[in-house]
Image (cartoon, rainbow, N blue to C red):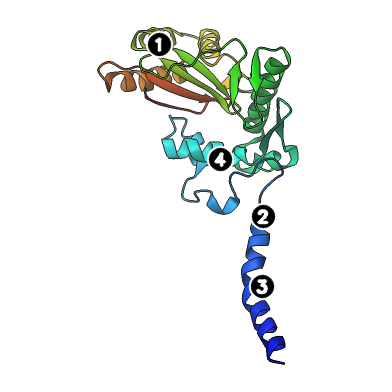
Amino acid sequence: MKKLIAIILTFALVLPIVQPLTALAHEYLPGDMLIPKETMPSEINIQEALEEERELTEEEFDALIGLFERYVFFRRGEIFVNQSGINGLSDMLGAEIITSMIEGIENLNELAQQGEIIITENGTIFEASDDEFVLQSNINRRTWHWWGVRELFSRATTSNWIHRLEQARNTAAAVTAISGLTGFLPGSVAGIVTMWYTQRLATDMRFRLNSTSNRGIVVEMTWILAYRTKVQ
């Protein structure tokens, strides 16, 4: 009888713990065991940040990536998207943003099929011809990511890009400039590329360039053209 009571008490104590853990597990999707909904920074309003059309802070940029990340996974050299899950973000971000992000991912899959890039099981993406990586500052280098590109620019290259962006005096020139900067421009976001956009990006890049004496900068650009800049 005492053993039976002990078993009942143990079950009663453990059950409240097991249930929340089980519920938490359902917040993940197969192939993406990274960010449960409970850990998303609720104090960051991504929709508001995007509507302000400015450079994102580091926290905002990471939160934006986190929104999409739970619906992205990697398998057999490709990037897969949980379509129904990612479409659920449309109410928050808008259908065009979802379309642009998917379009960028599909472009990476096409590059992988053409043998230009390699997509690994852990999500790392590198160019097939790239057999060397040197960790240093003030260099020029592009790395691909499922969410967009990371551009490392030397001081001289940064100055050249600032000049090129500032000289984009019409929409066509602006689109050409941003396409060259990112390596690929989703057609669904081309309409938001204006002279004002390129001027703002140039200003942000100049600010980072002037904040250091001898190092270049980094521009991280998503497929929806939300970006952040930092010093190398």
Q: Amino acid at mark 2?
A: Ala
Residue 69 position within the rendered picture, expressed as x and y whole percent measured from the top left = 61, 38
- Looking at the image, which residue is at 47% across and 14% down? 141
User: Relative to 42, is 108 above or below?
Assistant: above
- Give the residue at mark 4: 66
Could you give the CA–CA distance between mark 1 and mark 3, rounded to whole angstroms? 62 Å
User: Relative to 17, is 3 above or below?
Assistant: below
Residue 31 position within the rendered picture, expressed as x and y whole percent measured from the top left = 69, 40
Could you give the CA–CA distance between mark 4 and mark 3, rounded to whole angstroms? 31 Å
- Give the residue at mark 3: 15
- Give the residue at mark 1: 166
Could you give the CA–CA distance between mark 4 and mark 1, rounded to whole angstroms? 32 Å
- Looking at the image, which residue is at 66% across and 30% down? 121
Residue 213 position within the rendered picture, expressed as x and y whole percent measured from the top left = 25, 17
- Give the residue at mark 2: 25
Pick the residue in front: 82 or 98: 82
